Image: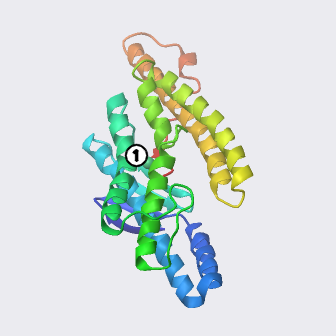
Amino acid sequence: MNLFRIFGIQLAVHASFVLLLAYTAWEGWQDGGWAGIAISIALTIVFFICVVLHELGHSLTAMRYGVRVPRILLMPIGGMAEFDRIPRQPSAEFIITINGPLVNFAIVLILWAVVGRPAGLPFHPHIEESLKGYTQLVLYWNALMGCFNLLPVFPMDGGRILRAILATRLTYLQATFWAARIGQVLAIALAGTSLYFWPKSMLPILFTFIYFAGGAEYKSVLRREQHEAYCAEMAKHVTTPVKSSDYDEPPSPPPLITHGPN
Ligand SMILES: [Zn+2]
């Protein structure tokens, strides 16, 4: 479902977002009736505004490198900016990627200056039921969002940063392979750990999703490289006679790359 355009980028929400809002409202109702619903919905909206700002950090930086960003999609598990391509220069990917978490850390610093940090950090923040308390909660969420995305689990931001670093030594495909493999091992470990410690949270589902997303993105890079190799081969054949068998099974064109979650 499309919402509106921001800096020329279509902001959209996934249909399952309705379920998240319904669940949030139900939780709010149990906490404090109509006022509880209003507070939970408002906090959820503010949380996703922070997700959009994080994605805009990536997107606006990517646009400076000539990348087209048609859409930012919000899902219950986070946001995803869709890029038509990801620059192959490691420095460009590094800067585009780091600018998402940096937006969160900038929000943390601004809110910290305004309302101070909540007591009980890092794991047991004490949040009062007041405007100051809720603002501190938003500060805390942004700190978590920034740190969480820096986990080296491809295709999360930390995994992309790992690929950019690896790509300074390896080919882009090898760097993607190793970033995806390391990410998948960590995703399994983190899914297991979160299932044990926080079974009711979204984390086990999120890490399972990331496990598959990492493998899928490696395959997409592999297909793209094969497609480019195929095109280069065809270009050579323009001036040389071609056997008909050379045209068997041309690889499909590469799909649109998504960037995210978060
Ligand atoms: Zn990000």
Q: Residue at x 58, y 17 (%)?
A: 245
Q: Percent x, y for residue 45? A: 46, 71
Q: Residue at x 33, y 57 (%)?
A: 109
Q: Is residue 67 visible?
A: yes
In the image, residue 85 sits, relative to residue 118, either above or below, namely above
Q: Residue at x 27, y 41 (%)?
A: 66
Q: Quadrant of the rendered structure where residue 15 is? A: bottom right
Q: Percent x, y for residue 62? A: 32, 44
As drawn, is 256 to the left or to the right of 8? right
Q: Is residue 2 visible?
A: no
Q: Percent x, y for residue 116? A: 37, 65
Task: Report the coloring of the rendering.
Answer: rainbow
Residue to which mark 1 is pinned: 83
Q: Nearer the viewer, residue 172 or 24?
A: 24
As drawn, is 237 to the left or to the right of 261? left
Total marks in image = 1
In the image, residue 261 sits, relative to residue 239, either above or below, namely below
Q: Percent x, y for residue 137? A: 47, 67
> Residue furthest toward the left?
64
SS under mark 1: strand
> Residue furthest toward the bottom?
34
Mark 1, Cα crowd under 10 Å, few <14 / some 14-19 / many 20+, is: many
Q: Nearer the viewer, residue 129 or 220?
A: 129
- Some atom of ligand 1 lies within 8 Å of the CB belonging to the residue at label 1: no
Callout 1 amino acid:
Phe
Q: Nearer the viewer, residue 233 or 188?
A: 188
Q: Residue at x 70, y 61 (%)?
A: 200
In the image, residue 111 sits, relative to residue 222, either above or below, namely below
> Residue furthest toward the front?
119
